[in-house]
Amino acid sequence: MGVELGGALKNVMAIGTGLSDGLGLGENARAALITRGLAEMGRLALAMGGQAATLAGLAGLGDLVLTCTGSQSRNHRLGLAVARGQTLAEAEASTPMVAEGVRTVASARALAARAGVSMPICDEVAAVLFEGKPVKDALASLLGREPRPEEEYVVRA
């Protein structure tokens, strides 16, 4: 379960980091989104029966970092394009390749709602892509959130 969710959710997180990078918010903002994205992914994976350790490895953190920072990431590039003023339709039409995170975000939010899991990055990415929320407002909402423990998704005995 952790491998499947990690592989899907990292695409949504990459759109989020693309939005941040497109506004020029810098590497600290990107690192914060990746870190909080990993926590968000972990909460849902645990709620669905996955193991936290799965997301600490290549199927989680490794794939997340690459997809959020790699020059070949379709999802990151889509976030960049939207942050720079393209509509979702324009960004999607500019490449023959699919940015999976666009479709994944709605499914992730539905799954999280059923499981009672908070997914603020997914919520803000969806608000930008589908509800017309300005990128600056979405990122300000995310980066202005109260700090929380990074290990919040670890199950304790």
Image: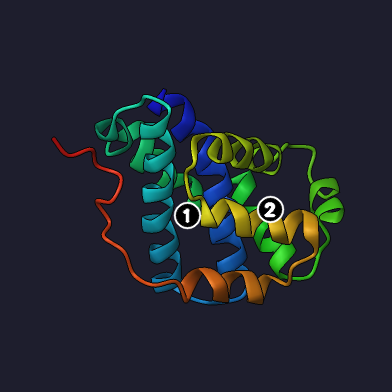
Q: Which residue is mark 2?
A: 126
Rendered location of residue 7, percent (x, y): 49, 32
Front one among 115 and 17: 115
- Estimate how packed mark 2 is, as few (under 14), some (14 to 19) or many (20 or more) residues with alpha carbons within 10 Å: many
Which residue occupies 43% across, 27% down?
A: 48
- Front in this rendered view, residue 30 or 129: 129
Camera sees residue 20: yes
Determine which of the numbered discs, if any, sits on residue 69 in the image.
Answer: 1
Q: Nearer the viewer, residue 31 or 52?
A: 52
Real-space CA distance between mark 1 and mark 2, rounded to the nearest whole angstrom: 20 Å
Name the side, left or right, on which 105 lies relative to 67. Answer: right
Numbered disc in front, either 1 or 2 = 2
Going by the numbered disc 2, the residue's amino acid type is Ala
Residue 120: percent from left, percent from top: 53, 57
Q: Is residue 138 above or below residue 94?
A: below
Foreground pick, 142 / 62: 142
Residue 82 picture quarter: bottom right
